[in-house]
Amino acid sequence: MPVFSLPSEYGIGDFGSGAYGFIDYLKKAGQSVWQILPLVQTGYGNSPYSSVCSYSFNPYFISPEILLEKGLATKEETEFCKSDAEYIDYGFLYSVRLPLLKKAYSRFDKEDKDFKAFKKSGRFYNYALFMALKYASGQKHFYEWEDCYKRRDYAALDAFYKDYAEETDFWQFTQFEAEREWFALKKYANDNGVSIFGDLPLYPALDSVDVWENPSIFKLDYNFTPKAVAGVPPDYFCADGQLWGNPVYDYAELAKDGFNWWAERISRELKKFDYIRIDHFRGLDRYYEVPFGAENAKVGEWVKVPSEKLFKVIHGVADKSRIIAEDLGIIDDGVRELLKKTGYAGMKILLFAFNGEKDNLYLPENITENSVCYTGTHDNDTLMGYLSAASSWDRNNFISGVKHSLKLFGEELKQESDFCLADAAITLGFACKAETFILPFADAIKKGGDYRINEPGTVKPQNWAVRFKKEDFDDNSAEKLLKLSVKFSRV
């Protein structure tokens, strides 16, 4: 369940009552893990995998309800932010949320000792500077700023901070407030037996605090233009491949200080979450780079990563049992060997299982314990969406495969309707040997393809914009999940 999809009167899910209500639902349903998408502030396209700062919190996740409770917002101001749109309207959010947050900051006690300590820590100093500079420049990319700013001349940055202290401190406030709300929510989840499973995108965006802070660790020219960008070759999701456009790492440069940037990043994320998933894990064995300016990702080059040295450093700061690898896409022996060496659990996707091949590693009966099983990910269609759009060949394979797998687990398919087939796939997820089974909420309540979180390779208004309602947290679905959890010893 992405945070942005949680029920809210204010146009997007946040760290307020909708999130607490979802944790109550999980507890009632006997569920012990809530997996989320990255909590970061998003940029163009609203994807949480393309952030202005990889360690930021999205200011949109600050709850208007909580601001109202704290006396930092008025009833009238929060009412103005309400939206009952079917999907998240990011244009509307942009027009109402920043003004609300600025009003909240104007009422906030700037001498608050915790806030002063937060600023003194310097953790979000560069983020605040970056955001203030971006607005002062008329929303230009950082590599279009004046040289003294884009190349981080410290005297110029100090002078800017003094001139724009109110603006930079406002951006510090957004992170201070979001962080406080997040850790209060996480504590509530943990106190109610729910662990939080976070997500770590492999690459930051080009126009980001990460690249601005550390341009030398990316393959950029003197003008900060990428020499190559990240993507994946053509695959199941996209015939042209996926051209992400993120700058790729320069591992020779990263190695100079012992991969400290990666060690700090992993360590920081494990303070925010109980577990993390490394997105596109295969990119830490070999990554795919495409020449800058290419129209698609069909032509690119695989580049080897010094993964043994990298993970030795990571495991010096991280408990490897808290890290899960997203080992999907083009997987070769190098990735399999890296997964084995790290000991990380990999991912098994049931929507990829039923293609008629008995040795398919995603078949429920072939899934091993050191795995996290899913019906599908945020990049897949929902179960109901997939079944309603499946070709007769795919549907017949799905039916015969599900029947066979169910039989092996002592279960049977009652009917061949979409609803019963979706139920059967969920049952198989609970029944398989994977240590953890993650069920997308849209599948738990049998939503169709209009509840798909993202369709890779497309820019659609529905991408990253799905919203659920409070009434979706109904007792019937909770009871059903609880029964399955008890039946298959997952409580």
Image (cartoon, helix red, strand yellow):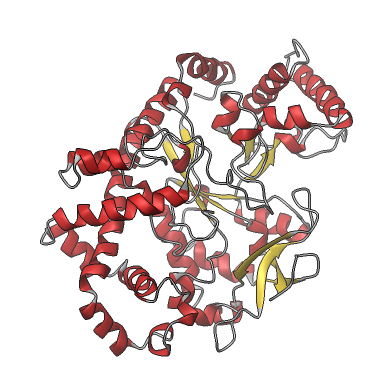
273 vs 111: above or below: above
Question: Would residue 69 appear left or right of 196 to someone viewing this image?
Answer: left
Numbered-mark total: 0
Residue 291 percent across, percent down from the top left: 72, 76
Residue 17 percent across, percent down from the top left: 32, 33
* Residue at 47 percent of width and 27 percent of height: 31
163 vs 230: above or below: below
Q: Quadrant of residue 27?
A: top left
Question: Would residue 470 appear left or right of 124 to someone viewing this image?
Answer: right
457 and 337: which is toward the camera: 457
Question: Would residue 404 appear left or right of 219 to someone viewing this image?
Answer: right
Residue 343 percent across, percent down from the top left: 61, 51
Q: Is residue 58 visible?
A: no
233 vs 86: above or below: below
* Residue at 17 percent of width and 57 percent of height: 106
Residue 478 percent across, percent down from the top left: 48, 19
* Residue at 89 percent of width and 30 percent of height: 393
Q: Quadrant of residue 131?
A: bottom left
Q: Is residue 87 visible?
A: yes
* Residue at 77 percent of width and 31 percent of height: 389
Question: Would residue 171 appear left or right of 317 to someone viewing this image?
Answer: left
316 and 253: which is toward the camera: 253
